[in-house]
């Protein structure tokens, strides 16, 4: 699967995060820090992506297998989303 995601909210007046640019790397079976990283042309095989809710980017990367381990704000946001999805299912009628 080709991956191209950009969640970089750069240039705000109050906060500009430090971003680590990583290019042309291959990772296999590794823990990958997502927050504050921009990966370009990287390949990930069976990696664990650690994400806490910060800015990130993937440009022209390849991902084979692996999984996401959310923590902090990212885990909280997913928990809230799950609650709202459950409420939505409960309030839907039989039609």
Image (spheres, grey):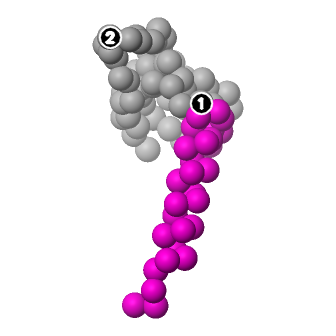
**Crowdedness of circle 2 by 10 Å Cα count: few (<14), some, many (20+)?**
few
Foreground of the two, 52 or 25: 52
Quarter of the image for the C terminus: give it.
Answer: bottom left
Residue shown at 45%/86% (left/top)? 93
Q: Is residue 49 visible?
A: no
Residue shown at 67%/27% (left/top)? 31
Residue 65 pos. (x, y %): 59, 44
Left or right position of 14 against 27: left
The magenta span reads 67-95
Left or right position of 36 against 40: right
The residue where tag 1 is placed is 52
Vertical relation: 13 (above or below) 65: above
Question: Of the residues under marks 2 and 1, which one precedes in the sequence?
Answer: 2
Secondary structure at numbered mark 2: loop
Quarter of the image for the N terminus: give it.
Answer: top left
Q: Which mark is residue 13?
A: 2
Residue shown at 38%/34% (left/top)? 5
Foreground of the two, 2 or 72: 72
- Image quadrant assignment for residue 60: top left
């Amino acid at each position: 699967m080709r991956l191209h995601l950009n969640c970089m909210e750069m240039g705000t007046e109050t906060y500009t995060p430090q971003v680590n640019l990583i290019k042309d790397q291959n990772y296999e079976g590794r823990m990958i820090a997502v927050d504050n990283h921009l990966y370009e042309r990287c390949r990930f095989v069976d990696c664990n992506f650690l994400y806490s809710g910060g800015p990130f980017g993937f440009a022209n990367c390849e991902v084979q297998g692996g999984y996401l381990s959310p923590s902090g704000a990212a885990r909280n946001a997913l928990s809230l989303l799950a609650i709202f999805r459950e409420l939505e299912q409960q309030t839907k009628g039989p039609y």
